[in-house]
Image (cartoon, grey):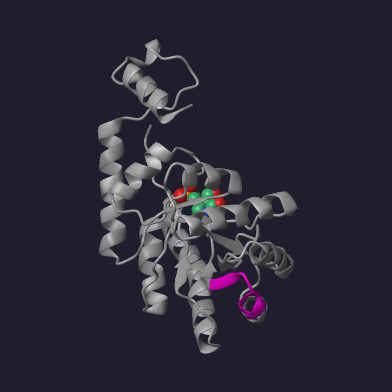
Amino acid sequence: MSRASQAAVFHRLTGRHKVEIETPCLCLDLPRFEANLAQVAATVRTAGKGWRPHAKCHKSPEIAARMILHGAIGITCSKVSEAEVFAGAGIHEILIAHLPVGAGRIQRLAELCQSAASGQSPTPIVTCDHYVQAAALSEECVRRSVTCRVLVEINVGMNRTGVRPGRDSRELARGIERLPGLRLAGIMGYEGHVMDMTVAEEKRHAIDAALGILAHTSDLFRQNGLCCEIVSAGGTGSLRQALRSLDRSSGRSCRFWRPLLCANA
Ligand SMILES: Cc1ncc(COP(=O)(O)O)c(C=O)c1O
């Protein structure tokens, strides 16, 4: 749907009672949505961090653009196909929090880097937890004469993805640093395993433990001369504690966080 027809639909539906709306339809209480945005943006800004909200649940360039108006430095998404939509809508600071696997996706990612570079926009950032993925992306980026920024994904306890902290993460980072067409930019971890913990004290400890792993890893990188300008973590269910936790354990500023805001639809 073109932006003009999207806008027409938006205006036709705005203010209607819910029984008048054909489903499925994403509905937002706009004043509450804006208030939530302002609150999260202020919280992250006060902590001196960058906010890169995850777009996986709304998948909407319109919502992402509003987040950026409120001060988000960019967005996070899970897949290249999502990143293509956001880039096509003019949102260029994009973190893809998984390294795409398979020749087709790698090609599309390199293509995204190429169109960003030709429009003089920042190229996307991707995360990586295996050298084989990095090598395939490097080859494609070299073929197209572009550079893709890469974060090493660290397993901070969720045991879903991510390389082990310590020696494994350092060796992967060294490997990435040597690959042409890639630029090592830092690390990312996602403490998704703590999000639905209900006992506050337990959750606090779990977040501290997960982000302590990230803090140690960023120390390790810097001690070994490995670039760690970005340390990315956080989610809606861990935002406040995560902002405090990484500060306390590392005493350093971390530029990119990616909590997803609750839109309270
Ligand atoms: C890697 C990663 N980062 C961030 C998020 C966003 O978390 P939330 O929706 O809690 O903000 C997710 C959600 O699954 C994720 O997989």
User: Left or right: 77 with respect to 167?
Assistant: left
Q: Is residue 176 magenta?
A: yes
> Residue 97, position in %: x, y?
56, 56
- Quarter of the picture holding the C terminus: top left
State which quadrant residue 243 falls in: bottom left
The answer, for residue 197, to whether it is visible in the render is: no
Magenta-span inclusion, residue 243? no
Say if residue 169 shows up in the picture. Answer: yes
The answer to whether residue 38 is above or below residue 46 is: above
Q: Quadrant of residue 143?
A: bottom right
Region rendered in magenta? 174-184
Q: In which quadrant of the rendered view does residue 183 lie?
A: bottom right
Q: Which x, y percent locates residue 181? A: 61, 69
Q: Image point 42% across, 51% down: which residue?
A: 53
* Residue 94 percent coordinates (x, y): 48, 54
**Figure check: 67 above or below 138:** above
Is 130 positioned to the left or the right of 117 in the image? right
How many marks are shown on the rendered structure? 0
